[in-house]
Image (tube, grey):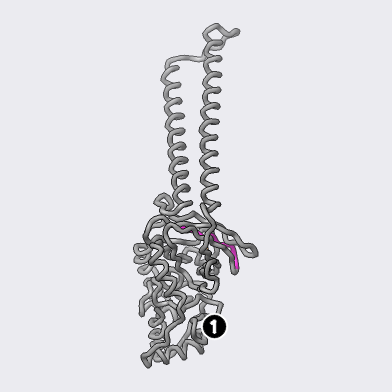
Amino acid sequence: MSTRRARVAVVASAIVLAGCNGTSSYLDATGNAGRSEAILGQWLTAVACAVVVLVCLAIVWGIWRHRGEQNAPSSGKSGTERREIRSGLRWIYVGIAATLVVLLVTFGGTMVTLNAASHPPRVPRLEIDVTGHQWWWELRYQDRAHPDEGFVTANEIHLPIGIPVRVRLRSADVIHSFWLPQIAGKTDVIPGQINEMWVEAKQPGTTRGACGEYCGLQHAMMTLPVVAESPEHFAQWTAQRRAEAVAPMAAEAHAGQIVFSRTCGVCHAVQGTNALGRVGPDLTHFASRPSIGAGILRNTRANLMGWIVNAPAIKEGARMPAMPLDPADLNAVVAYLQTLR
Ligand code: CUA
């Protein structure tokens, strides 16, 4: 795929994916901590607007009240002038008191919101270890009740509604920020330390998560769909994600698996096969993800071919090198990847 055609495909896909991933306005929050952050944001906006309006009205009123007056130099202060100075001082005291009240209420609201964002209502049973990479997300699900039932996925997060989830954040390279705008705000992902946040989805639906800290060339293309679903659907999804890849039946896909293990398996893992790479995203259930390259392309056959042949032409700076496979091998690998549901 030429660089120009690749760019056109990227722009077209970004437009389509922007629609299917939902909005990402934090004011439209559906998660526990995200909801209190949205309320705080609306409150601060309302207070700021009210202060601007009141100050403007006070200025207009002051100008109107003293219209036509002239400052005449005088040696001593008359009784009227002294009364006006006392009146002016009274307004300064009123202004300071009103400002203090607004600041104290805002401080209280901020503390309540911080508390909601930092402490789950009960100990989370479900944990997700998230690792930020340039430029994709690795997610390792752990269930405290069933420690042997963990699994790894990439560039997608599913959350069960009404169940608090602890998220532990690590970075494989530079500083990122894990941002689920409508669920729980953002938390920095810093090399050499583990940061924690907790999330709880309140309503079903798919929104969009992203990296919230500039982390290099493809910072904007480090997105993931955030799927909030009922605990039953979530259990189905986790059961499907835990399963190892099913060996392909068709001859072409079978041939593709051999090519994949030989060439792609150095970097990518497919559970249940001898592809065990840990450098790139785990592809065990790749075909059921909506996008390729952390949101840069829709997961279609044509896009997948273009991505394999020359990923850096589509996502400049991507660590995945161009893979100049011959057409038969390319078709076979794509056929194989499309069986990974
Ligand atoms: Cu990762 Cu910005």
249 within the magenta span? no
Secondary structure of residue under mark 1: loop
How far across and how far down the image is residue 320, in percent?
Answer: 51, 78
Q: Quadrant of residue 1?
A: bottom left
Q: Quadrant of the C terminus?
A: bottom left
Q: Can the viewer see residue 1? A: no
Beta carbon at label 1 within 8 Å of ligand 1: no
| Residue 215 in sight here | yes
* Label 1 crowd (10 A; few <14 / some 14-19 / many >=20): some
The answer to which of 295 and 77 lies nearer the viewer is 295
Q: Is residue 179 magenta?
A: yes
> 319 or 23, which lies in front?
23
Q: Is residue 71 left or right of residue 22?
A: right
Query: Image quarter for residue 160?
Result: bottom left
Q: How many marks?
A: 1
Residue lying furthest right in this view?
192
Name which residue type carries label 1: Leu
Relative height, residue 156 to residue 93 (above, below): below
User: Residue at image x 44%, y 71%?
Assistant: 238
**Residue at the spot of label 1:** 276
Q: Give the dominant element type of the magenta stretch: helix, strand or loop.
A: strand
Q: Nearer the viewer, residue 102 or 272?
A: 272
Q: Is residue 176 above or below residue 337?
A: above
Instruction: State the extent of the magenta-drawn residues as a range.
Output: 173-180
Relative height, residue 203 to residue 265 (above, below)? above
Q: Give the residue at x 44% y 29%.
A: 54
- Residue 57 pos. (x, y %): 42, 27
Q: Residue at x 52, y 21 (%)?
A: 91
Image spot of residue 241 (x, y percent) = 45, 74
